[in-house]
Amino acid sequence: MISSSLISQPLSFFLLGLCVENCLFAILSLLPRVVTIFNASERRVTPAIFYLIFALNASLLLYDVTGFYVAFNTTVDICRGVYKINNLFWHLFFIGFASFMLWKSWIVTDKNRVFLIFAVSALLYRTIWGIIDLAWSGGYWDAEIGCYYDQNGVSALHGAIGDVACDCIATIGSLTMFLKQENRELPFQSLWYQLAKENVVRSIVTLMVTCTIIYLDHASVHPAIFYIAYSVQEYTYIRLANVEIKYKRRRASLNSSLRAGRLSQIDS
């Protein structure tokens, strides 16, 4: 019988490699926009969401790089330190992704104040438990197995609760605006309809992935399956975030088309 590690480890590394490729592509794509922060005259042309996406990709890239390093080149002297850094980038990525999802849903709700209160509360809860997890979890050295990561169960549970809370709030916010009567009556190709549709799909997929990970975590599945699931989660999240770059171009094109259509009607 083939050892599960012989299958899971290459597959996990393959998925992590895809994550690295997506992160590098997004960073290179966004770099010309992000550097405008140093140019005051052009700063306003770069939406803040692009800075957040850039930070998301940088966090995941650094998390994967330190993950590869700790898997192949860790000694007793740096075991704790590398895992602390690795865990820091892990939390930065997930907190950043939650911020991204809540931000997009907040825009769709027309910046509703009640939604903002729930969103900030859930994000603050997730951030606090992320900080606690950095203190309670970490790398340890064992003479037989080498450097390993010891995850605190309490902080992991509350971190997962924070993730689900953020995902649920983002999904509810997107669905609420999408199901409003005035929004349902919008033309299929309208800019607002496209924006609502994008966020509904993205929020639902994110919530499904998060719930699946939590189920696997408490279902006592084989560690190999769990590692693959985490790799799939990373890849799914970064793809969902980076597709915003493509959506932004599509919305700009659609907005230009609608504007041109209105001008032609005025001229006629």
Image (cartoon, grey):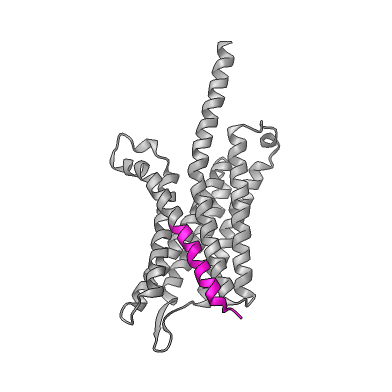
Q: Residue at x 52, y 31 (%)?
A: 253
The correct choice, above or below, for 185 with respect to 92 in the image is above
- Compared to residue 143, the image places residue 179 above or below, namely above
Q: Quadrant of the N terminus?
A: bottom right
Q: What stretch is highlighted in magenta?
A: 1-20
Image x and y of residue 236, in percent: 55, 57
Report x, y in % for residue 105: 56, 47
Closest to the observer: 76 or 12? 12
Quadrant in which the C terminus appears: top right
Can residue 56 be seen here? The reply is no
User: Observer-nearest residue: 116 or 104?
Assistant: 104
Q: Which residue lies furthest to the bottom in this view?
A: 143
Tell me residue 177's x, y (percent). 64, 42
Compared across the picture, whether 113 is left or right of 147 comes to right
Q: Where is residue 87 in the image (x, y as percent from the top left)?
A: 42, 69
The number of discs equals: 0
Q: Main secondary structure of the magenta part?
A: helix
Which of the pair 170/121 is nearer the observer? 170
Q: Can residue 93 be seen in this view?
A: yes
Q: Answer whether residue 26 is magenta in the image.
A: no
Left or right of 188, for residue 132: left
Residue at image location 60% in from the left, 60% down from the top: 209
Name the outermost residue toward the top.
Answer: 268
Res. 33 image quadrant: top left
Residue with the most extreme front position = 1
Residue at horizontal 49 percent and vertical 77 percent from the top: 152
Magenta span contains residue 14: yes
User: What residue is shown at x 51% (from left), y 61% (from top)?
Assistant: 234
